[in-house]
Amino acid sequence: MRKVIIIGSGVAGPATALALKKAGIASEIYEAYPGPGDAVGAFMGITPNGQDVLRTLGLYDTVLADGYETKGFHFTNSFGKSFGTVPANTITIKRGLLTKSLREAAEAAGIPIRWGKRLKDVQIMPEGGIAAYFEDGSSTVGDVVLACDGIHSAVRRSAFPNAEQPRFTGLVSCSSYSKVTLPVTKDHAEMVFGKNAFFSYIIKPTGEAFWFVNFDIKQDPGRDGLRDKNDAWWHAQLKELFADDQPFISEIIEASNQPIVGYPIYDLATLQQWQNGPVCLLGDAAHAPSPSAGQGASLALEDAVVVAKCLRDIDDPSAALQKFVSIRRERAERAVMQSRRNGSRKTPHGFLGRIIRDALLPIFLKQGGDATKWMYDYRIKWDEKVNTDARD
């Protein structure tokens, strides 16, 4: 194999390039934005399955140094009643710091990153291989194109024009950072089911609070429908949403010292096709969970290692990508559906809905450790060859 073309330089793109490098396969990354977006986005969690991939790529210590480690999620309601804790070792990290670590590692490994390359089209070549065409008039040819360009993937629009579209979950998310004097959250991320919205936060020993809010909305505002909302608008919405909840929530929100970032939440559970010949979708381009299970980054990291193993161990690129899909599809789709179920519990409608949720939630949480083992305990053995048996 001469070259793999990777579209997208977020989480999945550089991770895939690093895994391919480890497998002895050359790649180049093409990114639509004109330069690094280290200050773009909010924060994310990396659970044990994703952390294991970081160890494989030699990046665990770097990411841990930039992140904040917690041991689980502690759930309460708007009155402070504790429902219990779900154990889950998680590194919470600003998205820009994670992508920076991955990008810098890729650059240090000699992997080229081409900026300002917004994809226009991909075309499978009659003589073999695949070409990627960009809006600036340039193009490139390789053996494989891997789409690591997110839930609104340009590769998916080009290569799979009839593919299912992302689904609006009915939830909006917003997040920011604050400087507070409240107690440090220590071992757990706090998850609060408010009367009208869901609030989650961690407070580091420095007093910096990471927080996010999920609330429901009747109509999909559209992908860009909330980008023009300023902090004053968000503060007004959040003040009203949490007016009847514990005062510390509003205290954290009002102390925000960075812009509030808000967006509608979409997910993508099932696509008829992830792969067509030498082109394949990875990460959120193929399977996008809502943030409600904290699996977006970790699943993308898993994809990166598995696709590299398949291309390493199977000579024919199309067959390798078919194998990748067969390995990943069931697990990825199950994770998306788990996220969807988690999200449906965040903002039940009406007094009766909250009563039922609060009664059932302790039962779900007691089962939580066992119920999520399949997700968090997943490990990929880099040195183990891919089973090429078609029945696997």
Image (cartoon, grey):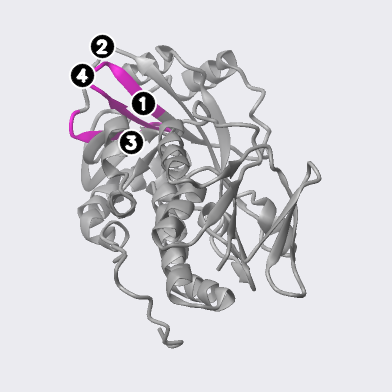
Nearer the observer: mark 1 or 4; the answer is 1
Q: Could you tell me if residue 196 is visible in this image? A: no
N-term mark: 3 or 1:
3
Question: Which numbered dot is residue 210?
Answer: 1
Does 260 appear above or below 332? above
Marks 3 and 2: CB-CB under 8 Å?
A: no
N-term mark: 2 or 1:
2
191 drawn magenta? yes
Give the residue drawn at x 54%, y 71%: 321
Task: Find disc 4 in the rendering and name its residue.
Answer: 183
214 drawn magenta? no
Task: Find disc 3 in the rendering and name its residue.
Answer: 92
Marks 3 and 1: CB-CB under 8 Å?
A: yes
Marks 1 and 4: CB-CB under 8 Å?
A: no
Task: Find disc 2 in the rendering and name its residue.
Answer: 181
Nearer the observer: mark 3 or 1; the answer is 3
Q: Position of residue 242 (x, y in %)?
A: 43, 23
Q: Amino acid at mark 2?
A: Thr
Q: Which residues are magenta?
A: 186-211
Q: Could you tell me if residue 186 is visible in this image? A: yes
N-term mark: 1 or 4:
4
